[in-house]
Image (cartoon, rainbow, N blue to C red):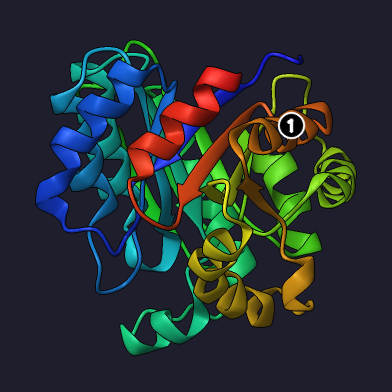
Amino acid sequence: MTNVRIGVMYDRDWAPEGLPEFARQAEALGADDVWVVEDLGWAGGVSAAAVALGATERVRVGIGIAPAPLRSPALLAMELATLARVFPGRLVAGIGHGVPEWMTQAGAAPRSPLALLEETITSVRALLRGERVQLEGREVRLADIGLVHPPAEVPPVVAGVVRPRSLELSGRAADGTVIAEGHGPGDLDNARALIAKGGAGPGHTLTVFAFACVGDDPDEVSRALHPHTEGHAAWLGRPQEEVFTVAGPSAQAARTVRELAEAGADTVVLRFAGEQPLRQLEAVLARL
């Protein structure tokens, strides 16, 4: 099989105090990544990443995804640099547009979401590289700012995006792209083409989030996934039955992960529904 990292998401609906033990157990089972979520009203991504990193020794921790409108690029770079210095080589920083309705609720809706995301990613990456940044952009303004303690090992900054112009932006500005839940191998072909159109180099990575439920009873699996795929179908603008999932018995779920890897995914992050998510993770890892 194409070499692929296997990650697991700590779902936003799970209480934050359960994250340290979850991350430890996921690491012990052999997961490569643990990804945490930053959605308005749930939990902070940087603080959750710090908790997961502090609870583990090897696993890589991804922030999926910090909304650019809620984050000052200077402050975000400072926070990421701190984590990257304390836990070198173990952080992936995801940045995205944020859900427009939530950004409006928070009083942070930008005039140009595309400009804001590109200027945020570009300036954060430059700051993490130890550069001084002078930027008078459409949305971001930084006046000769630099980090006193830039990381020796610069963490990748990846863009969590969906729409065509944003995928091109990711190829132009980010170290990698995060593809949201519900996208299958065919979608990845299209996404890779748009990322390449934006100018992505050979080192540009592709991380794919996937709803997952592992079990031998198809009715139980379907019931567990239904509320997730139902809401996502409306967001993606496609029928619910076309929302891609990693589902079924462990052998079938593993085959589905391989399909994503063969379509270009460097990392597949499983977002488990149903009971005993760590048991489900163990079953998939055993097949891989």
Q: Quadrant of the C terminus?
A: top right
- Residue drawn at x 55%, y 59% is 221
Left or right position of 133 against 1: left
What amino acid does circle 1 point to? Arg
- Front residue (pair 22, 250): 250
Left or right position of 148 against 38: left
Classify mark 1: residues with Cα within 10 Å, few (<14), some (14-19) or many (20+).
Answer: some
User: Which of the 4 quarters of the picture holds residue 15?
Assistant: bottom left
Which residue is disc 1 drawn over?
Answer: 255
Left or right position of 229 against 71: right
- Residue drawn at x 66%, y 83% is 234
- Image location (x, y in percent) of residue 4: 64, 20
One can see residue 195 in this view? yes
Q: Quadrant of the N terminus?
A: top right
Q: Is mark 1 on a helix, strand or loop?
A: helix
- Image location (x, y in percent) of residue 94: 46, 44
- Front residue (pair 51, 249): 249
Q: Is residue 203 above or below residue 252?
A: above
- Residue drawn at x 78%, y 20% is 202
One can see residue 112 in this view? no
- Image location (x, y in percent) of residue 71: 33, 59
- Front residue (pair 123, 178): 178
- Image location (x, y in percent) of residue 233: 68, 76
- Residue drawn at x 32%, y 39% is 77
User: Which of the 4 quarters of the picture holds residue 280?
Assistant: top left
Query: Seen from this angle, which residue lies furthest front?
Result: 217
Query: Seen from this angle, which residue lies furthest left?
Result: 17
